[in-house]
Image (tube, helix red, strand yellow):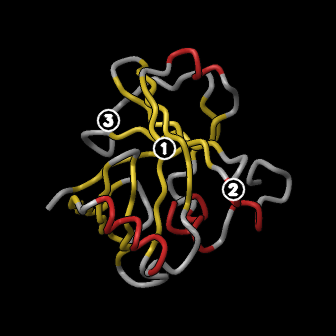
């Protein structure tokens, strides 16, 4: 069983952009709304995966991912998912021995920008870049699954989620 250990943060400035090493476009849709796991299809540039992730709040959870043909994934997004796809551009930003994933959301979730860091242990120390804002690891509203069903524009009162 694969365990994902990640922490999520809001991003408070664009200073991370000068350190981007690569980027990719994502579109992902969900097959279920509630339950003990989220089940999604994700297209990343020209590749696609089916992903099953334990529906628990916090920094560590079980995750499984399997490749699927791109044409099948496009059909699933169009015909089988319960909501419009969550669309974003992901940027990979190296910083102090870790690689941050910065997601810049589009559509109903714009102008949300979230930074994630994957860790090898829940208590692993890491350097916080200056552009990093408040931690949102335990705020379910910011999980991609939640953003599919309750987009950022519907609950972000002042444009920054607070």
Can you see residue 53?
no
Q: Residue 116, relative to residue 83: is it above or below?
A: above
Residue that lies at the very extreme toward the left in this rendered image? 1
Residue closest to the eye, 78 or 124: 78
Q: Secondary structure at mark 3?
A: loop
Task: Classify residue 25 as left or right of residue 161.
Answer: left
Q: Residue 11 location in percent, x, y?
A: 63, 36
100 relative position to 112: left or right: left
In the image as oriented, which residue stretches furthest toward the front?
A: 71
In front of the other: label 3 or label 2?
A: 2
Instruction: Confirm or deny contact between disc 2 and disc 1 (CB under 8 A).
Output: no
Above or below, 54 relative to 94: below
- Residue pointed to by mark 1: 25
Q: Secondary structure at mark 1?
A: strand
Tell whether label 1 touches label 3 (CB within 8 Å).
Answer: no
Could you tell me which quadrant the C terminus lies in? Answer: bottom right
Residue, x 35% and y 65% (percent of image)? 73
User: x%, y% of residue 99?
Assistant: 38, 28
Q: Nearer the viewer, mark 3 or mark 1?
A: 1
Estimate how packed mark 3 is, as few (under 14), some (14 to 19) or many (20 or more) residues with alpha carbons within 10 Å: few
Q: State the residue at coordinates (49%, 73%).
A: 78
Q: Residues within 10 Å of mark 1 (few under 14, many from 20)?
A: some
**Residue 121 place in picture, x, y as percent:** 26, 42
Q: Which residue is mark 2?
A: 107
In the rendered image of this protein, does residue 11 appear above or below residue 28? Answer: above
Measured in 3D between alpha carbons, the distance from the residue under mark 3 to the one under mark 2, in whole angstroms, is 34 Å
Q: Which corner quadrant of the image does residue 49 belong to?
A: bottom left
**Quadrant in the rendering for residue 134:** top right
Which residue was labeled with disc 3? 124
């Amino acid at each position: 069983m694969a365990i994902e250990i990640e922490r999520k943060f809001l991003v408070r400035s664009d200073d991370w952009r000068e350190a981007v090493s690569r980027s990719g476009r994502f579109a992902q849709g969900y097959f279920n709304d509630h339950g003990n796991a989220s089940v999604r299809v994700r297209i990343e540039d020209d590749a696609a995966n089916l992903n099953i992730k334990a529906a628990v709040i916090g920094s560590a959870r079980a995750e499984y991912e399997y490749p699927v043909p791109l044409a099948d994934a496009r059909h699933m997004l169009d015909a089988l998912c319960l909501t419009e796809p969550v669309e974003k551009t992901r940027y990979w930003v190296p910083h102090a021995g870790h690689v941050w994933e910065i997601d810049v959301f589009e559509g109903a979730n714009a102008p949300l920008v979230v930074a994630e860091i994957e860790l090898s242990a829940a208590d692993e120390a890491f350097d916080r870049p200056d552009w990093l804002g408040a931690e949102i690891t335990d705020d379910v509203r910011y999980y991609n699954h939640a953003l599919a069903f309750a987009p950022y524009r519907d609950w972000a009162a002042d444009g920054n989620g607070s």
